[in-house]
Structures are given as C-alpha cells and as structure tokens.
Image (cartoon, rainbow, N blue to C red):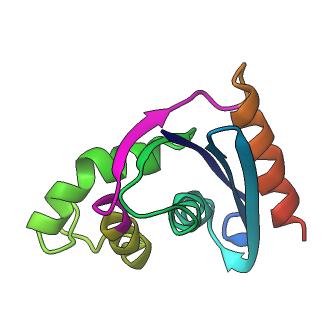
Amino acid sequence: MIKIYTDGSCIGNPGKGGWAAIILDDKKKTEIKGCKKDTTNNQMELLAPIKALKKIPKGSKVQIFTDSKYVKSGITEWIHKWKKNGWKTANKKEVSNKELWTELDLLNNEFEISWNWVKAHSTNELNNEVDLLARYAANL
C-alpha cells in the first residue's frame, strides 16, 4: 500500500502558489514539490495529488491524505454530479478548475484509491511536513 500526503499553498489567492506531496512506498519516502506564478490555492491542492499519482505505478493500491475538503469531497462526491450535469454545478455554473478535475478523475480511475481527510495544522506529522514543503515551494 502506497501512502501519499498532499498539500497546496498560495501567497495571495490568486497569487504565487506551491504544491507538494510525500510518497511513502514500503520504507522509501519521496518528496516532490513545484510552484506556479499565477494560481489559486484550490489549483495547488488539486495539482499535488495529480503530480504524486503520476510518480507511482498504475494500478497501485493508494491511500491519499489531504487537508483539503475541496479535494476530498470533490473527487469522492461532487464529481459524479458534475459529470452527469455536463460539468455544471448545482447552480448551473461551470465547474471551477475543470481541467484539473478531469485529469484527477482519469488518474483516480487508474488506481485503487482511498481518499482521507486530515485536519490541517494539527497532530499529523506528515501533513504538517507536506504543508511546510508546499509553503516553501510557493516561495520559490
């Protein structure tokens, strides 16, 4: 089972952003991160699991940990309605960040993923660590 901790950060919203992921595979720990000049916090939160999933073998069993209810609820609940409604929200508006949601949805179907929400800035060491990495990346 591969465990992935993800986070996104933004200086200003929109503004300069960073994303990060910690991938735990057996006893190996891999850290990845990146930044973008003009972005939003939600885009960085979505980019983190996308980038992490692209680093592991397709078909893997994965546990993803995120402190973003936007990502967790979006990929496990809201996305089904969005797709059924032609990528429109309940208010008939275009879904924000559709390109990222589409990419995450495709990746989500290539793995056996358990999506888990963790409280931000709390007692989860790896979540706190990935938060620091994302904030560092936003400042690059």
57 versus 65 height, above or below: below
User: Does the magenta run of residues contain 39?
Assistant: no
| Residue 45 visible here | yes
Residue shown at 62% from the left, 39% from the top: 26
Q: Give the range drawn in magenta.
A: 107-120
Q: In this view, does 128 lie above or below 43?
A: above
Q: Residue most toward the front?
A: 26
Measuring from the top left, give residue 85's x and y in whole percent.
11, 67
Q: Tell me the quarter of the image containing the C terminus.
A: bottom right
Residue ID at (53%, 61%): 56
* Left/right of residue 85 with respect to residue 74 in the rendered view: left
Residue at image location 14% in from the left, 74% down from the top: 86
Q: Which of 5 and 78 is in front in this view?
A: 5
- Rendering quarter of residue 111: bottom left
Measured along the vertical axis of the image, is residue 1 above or below residue 97? above
Visible in this render: residue 11?
Answer: no
The answer to which image quadrant residue 28 occupies is top right
Horizontally, residue 17 falls left or right of residue 107, namely right
Residue 137 lies, in percent from the top left, at 83, 64
Give whichever of 69, 92 is nearer the camera. Answer: 69
Image location of residue 118, percent across then percent down: 56, 29
Of all residues, the one furthest to the top in this rendering is 123
The image shows residue 90, relative to residue 62, as above or below, that is below
38 lies left or right of 109:
right
Total marks placed: 0
